Image (cartoon, rainbow, N blue to C red):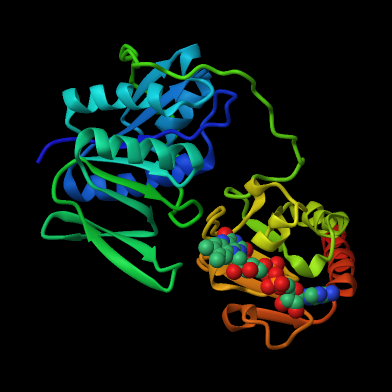
């Protein structure tokens, strides 16, 4: 069976790939080595910096397929999909992988429909059985893990961020860059208005190594400032439960859970979050889970590695002070 492993680049919109791309390439390299397949990056962007291309090569991309065109930003599924589908028809890749991000989730689903191939969404692991890849993905809000196999290539999958090891850097590699023509998109939508997200100055929720989530226990939007202070000290992102989002305390892009973002940080700290199953669906694969809740019976304590029974309005400022002191000590 021929064909490369393709990894769709998630970039920072400034011309450089994000860390999650290193995770895709790292995992693809692992299986590419086993199966004797090259690993290639697909980058659709309006701006690719030279050091961004070099970074992809350093992570181990044997080739970069680069579409650099103003029509590609911001992302529109009906413009990106034909470009990748047309190249896939010519090159017959063995696998096409993307990250669990808003745009790549949509792109991979569209590609699966276009290519008549199966998509394993939200994968957290892979294995080989009889020379075929098997993907592991959580189902029923993370209560069970299912194993899926593809009937035909390309094997399409989205990979959950912060689960897979980032590719080891190999210095001195230069990227082999191919620039395919951009396939004509049929009836693309046009932009009427574009609004930029307000910058929080904190890391992005799905990329952050530490996430502090706030729930209804915060009692009001102004109290998220407590979590932001702690986040500032720890270099963490701030997330929210759906109850907090539904109350209008945080925008939906900060929601963690089944109908929000899926995160898998090294450390998750839930403050005033009860731990409903739909919330757990979005964070239960975090490496270490801590919870601050005044109710010792709160369900979140069942999955927490460390639990603090107490009033978050007392506990969170104390934690902030203690972490600050520790940091100052170095
Ligand atoms: C189809 C569907 C999809 C859903 N998707 C999501 C989703 O994606 N994400 C999500 O989060 N939820 C989701 N939900 C909602 C979910 O079921 C819960 O209602 C929600 O997660 C509860 O949010 P919460 O923990 O902030 O609030 P609550 O359940 O009200 O919990 C608040 C917690 O704060 C504690 N508390 C109160 N005051 C303090 C204090 N001073 N100090 C410390 N602790 C305090 C309380 O003891 C309590 O445990 C979904 C529900 C449905 C039906």
Q: Along the horizontal axis of the image, is 259 left or right of 314?
A: left
Residue at point 46%, 13% (across, down): 69
Q: Position of residue 227 (x, y in %)?
A: 80, 59
- The residue lying toward the viewer, choosing from 303 and 190, is 190
Q: Nearer the viewer, residue 194 or 21?
A: 194
> Quarter of the picture for ligand 1?
bottom right
**Percent position of residue 17, x then y:** 51, 32
Q: Is residue 37 above or below residue 307?
A: above
| Residue 18 location (% of width, % of height) | 53, 37
For the N terminus, the image quarter is top left
Residue at left offset 33%, top offset 21%? 176
User: Left or right: where does residue 21 sit relative to residue 33?
Assistant: right
Q: Note whether 46 is above or below 157 in the view shown.
A: above
Residue 135, image quadrant? bottom left
Q: Is residue 270 visible?
A: no
* Residue projecting furthest to the bottom: 297
Q: Going 43% across and 74% down the picture, which residue do you hit?
A: 143
């Amino acid at each position: 069976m021929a064909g490369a492993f393709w990894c769709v680049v998630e970039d920072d919109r400034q011309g450089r790939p994000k860390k999650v791309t290193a995770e895709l390439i790292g995992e693809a390299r692992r299986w590419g080595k086993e199966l004797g397949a090259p690993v290639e990056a697909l980058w659709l962007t309006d701006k690719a910096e030279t050091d961004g291309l070099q970074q992809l090569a350093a992570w181990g991309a044997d080739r970069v397929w680069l579409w650099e065109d103003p029509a590609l930003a911001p992302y529109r599924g009906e413009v990106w999909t034909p470009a990748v589908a047309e190249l896939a028809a010519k090159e017959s890749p063995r696998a096409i992988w993307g990250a669990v991000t808003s745009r790549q989730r949509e792109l991979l689903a569209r590609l699966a429909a276009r290519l008549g191939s199966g998509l394993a969404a939200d994968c957290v692991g892979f294995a080989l059985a009889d020379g075929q890849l098997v993907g592991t993905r959580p189902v029923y809000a993370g209560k069970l893990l299912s194993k899926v196999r593809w009937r035909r290539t390309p094997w399409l999958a989205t990979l959950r961020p912060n689960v897979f090891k980032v590719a080891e850097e190999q210095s001195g590699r230069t990227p082999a860059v191919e620039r395919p023509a951009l396939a004509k998109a049929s009836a693309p939508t046009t932009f009427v208005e574009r609004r930029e997200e307000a910058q929080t100055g904190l890391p992005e929720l799905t990329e952050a190594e530490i996430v502090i989530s706030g729930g209804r226990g915060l009692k009001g939007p102004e109290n998220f400032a407590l979590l932001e202070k702690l986040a500032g000290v720890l270099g963490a992102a701030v997330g929210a439960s759906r109850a907090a989002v539904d109350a209008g305390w945080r925008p939906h892009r900060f929601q963690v859970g089944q109908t929000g973002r899926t995160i898998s940080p090294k450390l998750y700290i839930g403050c005033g979050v009860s731990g409903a199953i739909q919330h757990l669906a979005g964070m239960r694969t975090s490496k270490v889970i801590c919870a601050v809740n005044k109710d010792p019976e709160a369900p979140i304590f069942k999955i927490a590695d460390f639990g603090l029974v107490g009033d978050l309005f007392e506990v969170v400022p104390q934690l902030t002070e203690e972490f600050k002191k520790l940091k100052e000590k170095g």
